Image: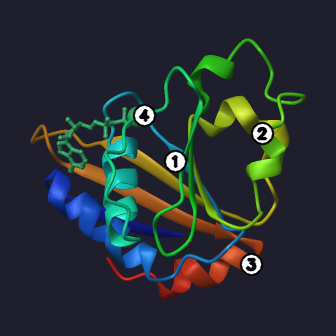
């Protein structure tokens, strides 16, 4: 487990830029944290670092947005609306662990579909300044190497 502190959105995106150097096809990254914790801000930083120029926003209504114009495909999930639906049987597993890197906001609502090998990131607002965040990173299985190599 590694823990980082960021003090503004740019620092959160700088960490995403470091992660972008390490991602590989098939990697799944779960982004946990409350509304406003910085999950989408982080995803925007990663997308930019992969060379994606279109605007990235939370796919709250369509659950999955796909970006193909970067170094590798980016699959961005926001599973919030799956809370009472169940994620299985909706075809989403086809996107997990395939040709791209997959980032998942609200992964607890896709728990049945998450691979054992994954990078878990948890975003927490810290007491004190409004823009202070703690970001905890834990690599499971093959993703343990990413945790080790990541330097924020
Ligand atoms: P989430 O996707 O987790 O709901 P967002 O990334 O959409 O969160 O929103 C985070 C909000 O918090 C943005 O308005 C962003 O500008 C602000 N913010 C302030 N400080 C930080 C920080 N250190 N890291 C990320 N976002 C921050
Ligand atoms: Mg979001």
In the rendered structure, which disc, 4 or 1, sits on the residue that comes first in sequence?
A: 1
Residue at coordinates 48% horizontally, 50% vertically from top-left?
A: 122
**Along the viewing direction, whichever of 70 and 60 lies nearer the viewer:** 70
**Along the viewing direction, whichever of 22 and 152 lies nearer the viewer:** 22
Q: Is residue 127 left or right of residue 116?
A: left
Q: Can you give x and y, in whole percent of width and height, for residue 120 in the image?
A: 59, 57
Q: Is residue 125 above or below residue 121?
A: above
Residue with the mark numbered 1: 31
Residue at coordinates 59% horizontally, 29% vertically from top-left?
A: 63
Q: State the separation of the CA atoms marked 1 and 3.
A: 18 Å
Circle 2 residues within 10 Å: few <14, some 14–19, many ≥20:
some
Residue with the mark numbered 3: 142
Q: Can you give x and y, in whole percent of width and height, for residue 100 in the image?
A: 65, 65
On-image quarter of the C terminus: bottom left
Picture quadrant where residue 33 is located: top left
The answer to whether the beta carbon of the residue marked 1 is less than 8 Å from any atom of ligand 1 is yes
Q: Is residue 67 left or right of residue 49?
A: right
In the rendered structure, which disc, 3 or 2, sits on the residue that comes first in sequence?
A: 2
Residue at coordinates 54% horizontally, 70% vertically from top-left?
A: 1
Q: State the separation of the CA atoms marked 4 and 1.
A: 12 Å
Q: State the separation of the CA atoms marked 4 and 2.
A: 17 Å
Picture quadrant where residue 111 is located: top right
Circle 3 residues within 10 Å: few <14, some 14–19, many ≥20:
few
Circle 4 residues within 10 Å: few <14, some 14–19, many ≥20:
some
């Amino acid at each position: 487990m590694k823990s980082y502190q960021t003090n503004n959105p740019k620092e959160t995106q700088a960490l995403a830029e470091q992660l972008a150097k390490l991602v590989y096809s098939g990697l799944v990254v779960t982004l946990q944290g409350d509304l406003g914790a910085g999950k989408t801000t982080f995803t925007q930083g990663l997308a930019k670092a992969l060379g994606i120029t279109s605007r990235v926003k939370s796919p709250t209504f369509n659950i999955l947005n796909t970006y193909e114009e970067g170094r590798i495909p980016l699959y961005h999930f926001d599973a919030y609306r799956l809370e009472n639906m169940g994620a299985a049987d909706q075809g989403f597993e086809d996107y997990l662990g395939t040709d791209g890197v997959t980032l998942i906001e609200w992964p607890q609502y896709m728990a049945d579909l998450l691979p054992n090998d994954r990078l878990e990131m948890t975003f927490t607002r810290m007491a004190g300044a409004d823009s202070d965040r703690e970001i905890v990173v834990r690599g499971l299985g093959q993703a343990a190497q990413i945790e080790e190599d990541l330097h924020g």
